[in-house]
Image (cartoon, rainbow, N blue to C red):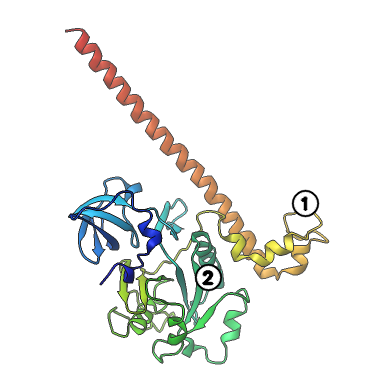
Amino acid sequence: MNLEALGWSPVWAALLPFPLTSEQSIGRVAVAHADRAELLPAGVVFQPKTAADRLQVGDWVVVEGSRLLRRLPRKGVLSRRGAGMAGEPQIVATNLDVVFLTSSLNKDWNPARILRGLALVHACGAVPVVVATKCDLAIGNEGRFLRALPADLPVVLTSAHLGIGIEELVSHLAPGRTVALIGTSGTGKSSLMNALLGAPVMDTGEIRLHDDRGQHTTTRRELRVFDKGVLIDTPGMRELGITDSAGLDLAFADVVEAAAGCRYSDCGHEGDAGCAVVDAVAPDRLEQWHKLQREAELEARRGDQRLTVEQNRVFKQRSRAAREREQWRGKVQGR
């Protein structure tokens, strides 16, 4: 396996901070553990001690043996708000080119969740593709599921069981291009991975009859390379909370376009007479836009609170260190 197959290019080479010696090498994080990270083409490196510096799946690094020398700047960072109301932002994967947003065409189909994912993907700068899995369960009713999505959003109907849509998915791949699969548990990501890889590499589970969902089988994020590209599989994520408003304008381009023609400069697009947005955008879609805007504003306030807490923590650490230095100086001078 060479670096080009992993996505290495002259763009990345230009980011190297220094010429490499014979003992140093380039690697890409395939699996990130608490204490170490597994690299491709080969090797293991120890994780940094601070949480902010932790390596994530998809990172490019410069190493010397098992020692991390440098992590290259990231692009295409897919992040989400962690589970729970106070969840910290979590990095799902880095240096992405395309993201497959998977959702099953059954009882688990959730357009609101897809739109959240769409905003996250736009924010990271990757290309979104909705992958509607298990389409064999909705033959003839596909339109009922898809009508809530933007008309210009790429959607691929797939059935890994019947081999439907796999070739169309492959058209979004390319050697060296990095594609991540995200979605809730049981949407068939592992089955898709096996279909794309052409081998039963990932474990899969049967569909549960009581809720029409598959079993949770993927337990960690992992980067895999094959002749058609680079794939990153992820565990099922029930929540895809957005971390900020970045990406919402692209995910709701029709709302933004209509807002530009609104007669009110400070309109909240909540139903005022003559509001261009209310007249042009479907009520359900406008309601979802308002909901995600409120979610982004709430997360921004949380971010400000987290920043204040971190600043206070750093201030207290520095003050304590300063007091300890003064005490040490006083003891030395008193001798």
Task: Say which amino acid is labelled 1.
Answer: Ser
Q: Residue at x 27, y 61 (%)?
A: 27
- SS class, disc 1: loop
Give the spatial CA distance, label 1 vs label 2: 30 Å
Residue 308 versus residue 255: which sits nearer the camera? Answer: 255
**Residue 157, horizontal then vertical, whole percent:** 50, 84
- SS class, disc 2: helix
Tell me: 308 left or right of 278.
left
Residue 215: name its quadrant: bottom left
Q: Residue at x 46, y 78 (%)?
A: 172
Dot 1 surroundings within 10 Å: few (below 14), some, or many (20 or more)? few
Which residue is tagged 2? 114
**Residue 43, horizontal then vertical, whole percent:** 20, 62
**Residue 65, horizontal then vertical, whole percent:** 17, 55
Q: Residue at x 21, y 65 (%)?
A: 42
Residue 194 visible at all: yes
Residue 212 visible at all: no
Between circles 1 and 2, the one closer to the viewer is 1
Residue 280 versus residue 1: which sits nearer the camera? Answer: 1
Tell me: 171 left or right of 300.
left
Residue at the top extreme, as displayed: 334
Residue 18 versus residue 305: which sits nearer the camera? Answer: 18
Which residue is tagged 1? 265
